[in-house]
Image (cartoon, rainbow, N blue to C red):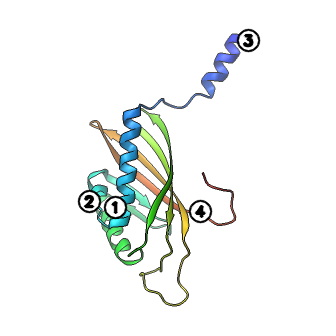
Amino acid sequence: MKILLVAVLFLANAPAFAQSKPDEDQVNLLVDDLIASFNSHDFKTLEVNSTKDVSWVNMMGRWWKGRDEVVSAHKEIFNKIFNGVKFEKKSVSMRFLSADIVVVHVIEHVDAFFPPDGVDRGGNKRPASDDNLQLVYLKTNGKWLLSAAHNTEVQPGGPPVK
């Protein structure tokens, strides 16, 4: 009976799916490409590495639907608000829900910027902060594609983010 109880407790606490190293490496490269696109404002990789029906909720709560809208909105916002702003990956955490679904949390540092249009108006500077970017990738025909994203600014004074 004790062995059965130990086995049940072990299985109840096991990860949802044991990911493969090659899949984890591929997803890490996609995250690196995404951060690089934030810094270069070239969103070709976002376009080729996302599903047609990708959705994205940005840090201000705007919900973009579909690849064309997601890519277009990124181009517009990054050429205005984030012009010259540096993005830096701090950490990545992955949870594979199945062989073809992974949820990724990226903590990224974002330098100060001027909303709503990147122009300094004397009181609109947002200080540098960390963001928690949640990404959902689907493996389709052997390739990982971004299906959904949600970006949240980590508020100062809260518990530390790892």
Q: Answer above or below: position of 18 versus 134.
A: above
> 15 or 25, which lies in front?
25
Say how many tags the image has. Answer: 4
Q: Which residue is mark 2?
A: 44
Residue 138 occupies which quadrant of the picture? top left
Q: Which residue is mark 4?
A: 154
Mark 4 and mark 3 lie on one chain; the one further toward the N terminus is: 3
> 44 or 8, which lies in front?
44
SS at circle 2: helix
Tell me residue 159's x, y (percent): 69, 57
Q: Is residue 6 visible?
A: yes
What residue sits 50% from the left and 69% below the top?
Answer: 60
Q: Which residue is mark 1?
A: 37
Mark 4 near mark 2, Cβ–Cβ under 8 Å?
Answer: no
Closer to the eye: label 4 or 3: 4
Mark 4 near mark 1, Cβ–Cβ under 8 Å?
Answer: no
Mark 4 and mark 2 lie on one chain; the one further toward the N terminus is: 2
What residue sits 66% from the left and 56% below the top?
Answer: 160
Name which residue type carries label 2: Lys
Label 2 Cα neighbours within 10 Å, binned few <14 / some 14-19 / many ≥20? few
Res. 2 mark: 3
Mark 1 near mark 2, Cβ–Cβ under 8 Å?
Answer: yes
Q: Is residue 133 left or right of residue 10?
A: left
